[in-house]
């Protein structure tokens, strides 16, 4: 179901309206470009400008310059073999000078800047279909919300800019997270009301596959509410890492209720459905099966020149014919995570890891404990030690010819997450884990697993079980760091995986420092 759709053809045009900037990214001094006052004249301009906001997610080999998922992976309890590159994330010792931060920070704010221009300028366009105008604004607001949601979860209090910058305007100070979440929620509410359905056509215009849909907006809003609810719950219980969430109005219970309602709305939308067997579940991650009915929002990869991603190389072993060669193998799960923080016998885990592979000289076969590979010299069969790490099979692309030509999409949110969020919300609203069973078992049944039972569980035991369900279903998709921080178990999970030295996490480790490049350029940030 992989589709090369119309808005990809607008990418080159879209890139022409991206702003270059100097000094602080928040000061956005436009250089050598057509002025926005001359650009936003008709629907072609509106769509091209919106396409540029999507294109921001694809720059530098994709999804915040290919760094974001590796940062999240390293900062979680999953593990990373590339300690030289992401070692500070693994150890919780990230400094503002860390080289993995600036690219992510800058690209997020470029995306926000371009979204702000669309949101500010498109309403004044007269020569455009009214429903199309609202859809464009809905998609732009979804993308701005996604960018701010990633910022606030990773960095905490950050500068909040919602209008185009004026010449000479200084950088902004940091805003409280309640103000940032207010914008995120407002943007996503607008998106739920004005984005279109999956592949929907109105007045001769089609919501091409790959664009934001009403369902993806509801799902992202549910994810925002779950983030607030669980973070505020744990903060109320004394978790200092989430203390900033105490400033958000209303109770944790009210946000769980809102999350449940949004999940219901997602599941009422057409165009998306769960697969019905294990074989099809494995296939939802096939590089040629992007935008399948389990994916609510993907950032597009393509075999088209300069439209590929680096995703396969980040998560598959180097020179194994699984990712196009190049650097390879940046992220792999470590034995202590597999033994202690996930059910390694879960069918989903066993069918989302690489069981065997070969490089130029060595054959690797998963060991009996599923925590590493037995190595043999391919030409002779002689033993060659072990490799104590395990690679995911979710991002394989055997057709990739270089490290930057994978057609794998970046999976931002998918349908299974919605069921798991609703299960969590139902249990929390009623303080009754049994009410989560139905949604969890829908996911288990589709892959042939026995039912989950919450009989006799208290809420603490349920939350631990839920985290194991979430990581078995969603492993290596960018959710784990956010799950174990919002649930207030960051220190516990990292100590289990890394030990009491590398694994120790303090309250300040729940977010990353703002990069030095921004602090130095923006006099309003301390």
Image: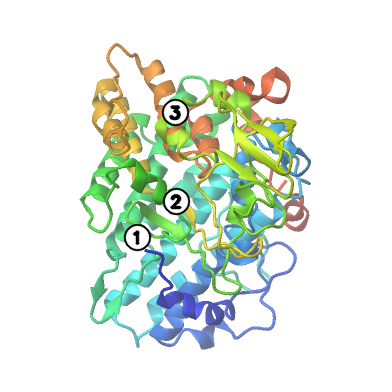
Q: Residue at x 55, y 59 (%)?
A: 161
Q: Earlier in the sequence, mark 3 or mark 1?
A: 1
398 horizontally vs 387: left or right:
left
| C-alpha separation, residue under disc 2 versus residue under disc 3 | 21 Å
318 relative to 9 in the view: left or right: right
Residue 47 versus residue 514 in the image, above or below: below
- Residue lying furthest top: 456
Residue 403 place in picture, x, y as percent? 66, 60
Mark 2 → mark 1, Cα distance in angstroms: 27 Å
Nearer to me, 525 or 306: 306
Tell me the number on the disc at residue 285.
2
Residue that appears at 34% across and 60% down: 191
Tell me the mark number nearer the camera, choosing from 2 and 1.
Answer: 2
Q: Which residue is mark 1?
A: 191
Image quadrant in which you'd find residue 168: bottom right
Tell me if I can see residue 240 in this picture. no
User: Which quarter of the rendered picture does the N terminus lie within?
Assistant: bottom left
Q: How is the image coloured?
A: rainbow
Q: Earlier in the sequence, mark 2 or mark 3?
A: 2
Q: Nearer the viewer, residue 382 or 27?
A: 382
Residue at 29% x, 68% y is: 199
**What residue is shown with label 3?**
467
Q: Position of residue 372 (x, y in %)?
A: 63, 30
User: Badge 3 local density, few (<14 within 10 Å), some, or many (20+)?
Assistant: some
Whether residue 451 appears in this view of the structure is: yes
**SS at circle 2:** loop
């Amino acid at each position: 179901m992989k589709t090369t759709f119309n808005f990809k053809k607008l990418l080159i045009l879209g890139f022409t309206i991206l702003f270059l900037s100097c000094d602080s990214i928040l000061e956005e001094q436009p250089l050598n470009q057509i002025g926005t006052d001359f650009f936003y004249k008709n629907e072609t301009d509106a769509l091209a400008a919106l396409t540029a906001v999507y294109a921001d997610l694809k720059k530098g080999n994709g999804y915040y310059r290919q760094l974001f998922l590796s940062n999240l992976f390293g900062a979680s309890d999953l593990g990373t073999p590339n300690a030289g590159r992401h070692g500070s994330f693994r150890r919780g010792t990230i400094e503002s000078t860390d080289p993995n931060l600036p690219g992510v920070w800058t690209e997020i704010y470029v995306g926000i800047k371009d979204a702000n221009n669309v949101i500010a300028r498109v309403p004044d366009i007269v020569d455009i279909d009214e429903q199309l105008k609202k859809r464009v604004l809905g998609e732009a607001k979804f993308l701005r919300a996604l960018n701010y949601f990633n910022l606030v979860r990773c960095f905490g209090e950050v500068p909040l800019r919602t209008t185009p910058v004026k010449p000479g305007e200084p950088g902004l100070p940091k805003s409280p997270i309640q103000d940032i979440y207010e914008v995120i929620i407002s943007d996503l509410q607008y998106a739920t009301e004005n984005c279109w359905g999956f592949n929907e056509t109105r007045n001769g215009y089609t919501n091409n596959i790959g664009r934001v849909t009403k369902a993806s907006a509801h799902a992202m809003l549910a994810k925002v509410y779950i983030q607030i609810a669980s973070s505020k719950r744990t903060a109320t219980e004394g978790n200092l890492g989430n203390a900033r969430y105490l400033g958000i109005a209303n109770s944790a219970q009210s946000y769980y209720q809102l999350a449940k309602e949004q999940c219901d709305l997602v599941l009422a939308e057409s165009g998306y459905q769960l697969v019905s067997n294990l074989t099809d579940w494995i296939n939802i991650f096939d590089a040629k099966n992007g935008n399948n009915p389990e994916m609510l929002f993907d950032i597009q990869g393509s075999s088209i020149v300069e439209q590929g991603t680096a995703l396969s190389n980040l998560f598959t072993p180097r020179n194994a014919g699984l990712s196009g060669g190049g650097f390879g193998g940046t992220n792999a799960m470590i034995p202590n995570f597999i033994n202690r923080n996930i059910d390694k016998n879960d069918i989903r885990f066993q069918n989302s890891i690489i069981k065997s592979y070969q490089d130029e000289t060595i054959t690797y076969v998963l060991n009996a404990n599923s925590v590493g590979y037995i190595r043999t010299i391919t030409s002779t069969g002689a033993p060659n030690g072990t490799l104590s790490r395990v690679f995911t099979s979710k991002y394989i692309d055997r057709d990739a010819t270089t490290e930057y030509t994978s057609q794998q999409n970046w999976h931002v949110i998918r349908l299974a997450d919605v069921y798991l969020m609703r299960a969590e919300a139902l249990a929390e609203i009623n303080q009754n884990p049994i009410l989560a069973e139905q949604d969890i078992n829908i996911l288990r049944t589709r892959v042939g697993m026995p039912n989950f039972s919450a009989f006799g569980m208290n809420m603490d035991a349920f939350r631990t079980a839920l985290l194991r369900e979430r990581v078995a279903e969603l492993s290596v998709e960018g959710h784990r760091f956010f799950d174990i921080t919002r649930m207030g178990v960051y220190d516990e999970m990292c100590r289990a995986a890394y030990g009491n030295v590398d694994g120790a996490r303090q309250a300040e480790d729940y977010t990353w420092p703002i990069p030095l490049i921004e602090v130095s350029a923006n006099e309003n940030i301390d």
